[in-house]
Image (cartoon, helix red, strand yellow):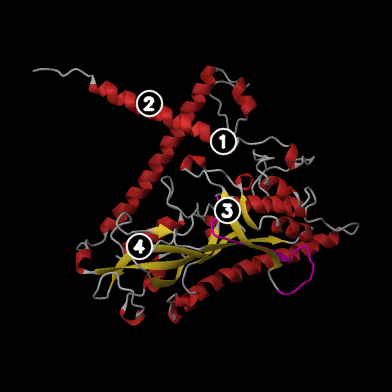
Amino acid sequence: MATKGEKRINLSKDDLLKLTNEELAENVLRLQASNTQLRNLLKKHTEESTVNSSCSPKKRPFDFTKHKRRHILLRILYLGWDYQGYATQEDTMNTIEHHLFAALTKACLIENRQTSNYHRCGRTDKGVSSFGQVISIDVRSKLKEDYSLSTDTANEIPYCKILNRLLPDEIRAVAWRPAPPEFSARFDCVQRTYKYYFPRGNLNLEAMDKAAKYILGSHDFRNLCKMDVGNGVVNYVREVRSVDIQPCSQTKSNSQFDMMVLTLVGSAFLWHQVRCLVAILLLVGQGYEQPEIMLQLLDIDANPRKPQYSLASEVPLNLFHCQYPFDDSSWLTDIETLDEVHSTLQKMWTFSSIKTNMLNDILDQITKLRTEQEFSFDVSETLIQGVKSKIYKPLMQRQTCESLESRLQHYSKKRKLDECSENTSVEAAAVVPKVEN
């Protein structure tokens, strides 16, 4: 047992159970102090940013009332590997949405988020990228009428060009188009395409493809996602319209290092649905599970509780395309913007390719040193999160998560308790005697 006052880092559950109440209290106080310190650092960083921006010569506030507005769709690409997800978060500014709104505000294209009539097509998690993210938003316009549907780019603000000057290199505005004021990037999207990239390794691609085909059509995917009952998601039926596994390039070398891509097309997807599907497909490809495991997971009558398994990595996932009820050729862009985006991405590709080929040469040299037997490339160890067990336990023999019905009951009771607590507070406030002067 550690002595009093000694720092405890990364304690296990068993270690915590051995602590005395005094030691537990010390750990809680230490965590609270650490949280306070982190909040102060974040506050200091924010205040410094504000001071630095205020040090510049003060400009007259931009008068949005003197300008017309229009509703547009913006097509955004981003490489999310080094970001904390797409959506804005309270405890970090390192999100795609934060940078996007910072650029929109600085360019005086919007006054603020609250009045911008903003919607996003999808909310991608930490580390996930997108080539086809779309947002709908009201922006400032040079035209003489409000909410124009004109496609005359010569007399309009070059939205993509302006934003790209202010955005980080990993986030680019690619194209835009006018839309009616009521059009929503989220609710008017008719189809979404996700891509997941992975190396061939020693995977049985035929077995993976067979398992993948079982998810075609409409199914209840509660065992192949993270249930989000707390945010009101109670329907887990989704339609998968297309699923395909193909090599990334036309060269068929059958090397372990060949890159493959899983392409999924559907009307909408659940939280972590693609990463759960890929995790199961990788287990099938490794031979740990049969393709029919997918049928068992889709059979919620026989298996109403999701077995515990780890997610596939977020890094290879890409929200590749969002389809709307109009032709893709109607997106507006210009040669200068496309050249800039292409040049920026090619610089990133150059250094990534150099690193990839350098690693390939090093791997070749290491392989030559082992003459007895070739190395085995286990993709599941690389792409499936968590610690791999020495002895594999089949999915259907593992512990299961709480069922959807149990979760619904839990949140229903919680809401009732919250309502009772609120009512009690209101009643208590109502019976407080008035103090007469």
Label 2 sits on what residue type? Cys
Q: Position of residue 227 (x, y in %)?
A: 56, 43
Asked if the residue under mark 1 is in contact with the one under mark 4, i.e. CB atoms within 8 Å, the reply is no
Residue found 60% across the figure and 45% down from its top: 222
Disc number at residue 429? none
Q: Is residue 68 magenta?
A: no
C-alpha gap between disc 1 and disc 3? 18 Å
Q: Is residue 259 magenta?
A: yes
Label 4 sits on what residue type? Glu
Quarter that holds the N terminus:
top right
Label 1 sits on what residue type? Glu
Q: Position of residue 14 (x, y in %)?
A: 64, 25
C-alpha gap between disc 4 and disc 2? 38 Å
Q: Earlier in the sequence, mark 1 or mark 2?
A: 1
Quarter that holds the C terminus:
top left
Asked if the residue under mark 3 is in contact with the one under mark 2, i.e. CB atoms within 8 Å, the reply is no
Viewer-nearest of labels 1 and 2? 1
Disc number at residue 420? 2
Query: In the figure, residue 386 lies in which quadrant?
Result: top right
C-alpha gap between disc 4 and disc 1? 36 Å
Q: Which residue is mark 4?
A: 182
SS type, badge 4 = loop
Q: Earlier in the sequence, mark 2 or mark 3?
A: 3
SS type, badge 3 = strand
Query: In the figure, residue 251 lies in which quadrant?
Result: bottom right
Residue found 14% across the figure and 18% down from its top: 435
Q: Is residue 226 above or below residue 143?
A: above
Query: In the figure, residue 148 lies in which quadrant?
Result: bottom left
SS type, badge 1 = helix
* Predominant secondary structure, magenta span: loop
Disc number at residue 238? 3
